[in-house]
Amino acid sequence: MYQPYNFEDFLGNIGELDYSEMLQASVREATAAEARLSPGRGGRGINKQYRWIAVEYVRLLKGFIFFLRSSIQPNELSMEEFYCFRPVVEKLVKKGQLKSSVLDLFRS
């Protein structure tokens, strides 16, 4: 069943992209979700039943973007949330687009 604002689904969809494409897709997705959260005058916002899910989705996206840009674990994410990045990060390491040492963050 489709669930809007599912971060793990988003990671699955971008998992094969190169680093720069992955970063761009993440920024676009976060920007679009934020725009739906605050649509402005006359704009269509998010259905109230999905609002909290969308807020959390944006938080995860921003954490992922921060990680991609800095290779530092975001403080605002739990370890469980952070660990969901691992499959995508491993693919980037295999492609040589992130240093292998970044995987050490997932071993602690």
Image: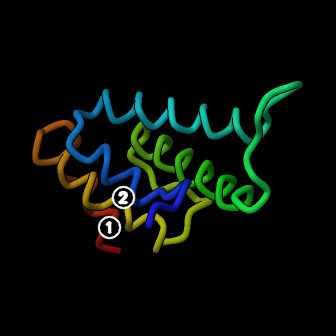
Describe residue 82's horizontal placement relative to residue 102 as left or right.
right
Residue at x 48%, y 67% (from the top left corner): 81
In this view, 3 is above or below 22: below
Q: Where is residue 26 in the image (x, y as percent from the top left)?
A: 45, 37
Describe residue 8's horizontal placement relative to residue 52 as left or right.
left
Work out whether residue 101 or residue 92 is closer to the camera in this orientation and state it. 92
Work out whether residue 83 or residue 57 is closer to the camera in this orientation and state it. 57
User: What kind of element bears circle 1?
Assistant: helix
Task: Count every numbered label the image shows and give the total.
Answer: 2
Dot 2: few (<14), some (14–19), or many (≥20) neighbours within 10 Å? many
Dot 1: few (<14), some (14–19), or many (≥20) neighbours within 10 Å? some
Quadrant assignment for the C terminus: bottom left
Amino acid on which the number 1 mark rests in the picture:
Phe
The colour scheme is rainbow
Q: Where is residue 17 in the image (x, y as percent from the top left)?
A: 24, 37
Describe residue 41's horizontal placement relative to residue 69 as left or right.
right
Residue at x 17%, y 50% (from the top left corner): 91
**Closer to the eye: label 2 or 1:** 2
Image quarter for residue 107?
bottom left
Amino acid on which the number 2 mark rests in the picture:
Phe
Report if the CB atoms under discs 2 and 1 are less than 8 Å apart.
yes
Tell me the number on the disc at residue 42: none
Q: Which of marks 2 and 1 is nearer the N terminus?
A: 2
Dot 2 corresponds to which residue? Answer: 85
Q: Position of residue 55 (x, y in %)?
A: 69, 53
Dot 1 corresponds to which residue? Answer: 106
Q: Distance between the residues labelled 2 and 1?
A: 9 Å
Q: Position of residue 88 (x, y in %)?
A: 27, 52
Quadrant assignment for the N terminus: bottom left
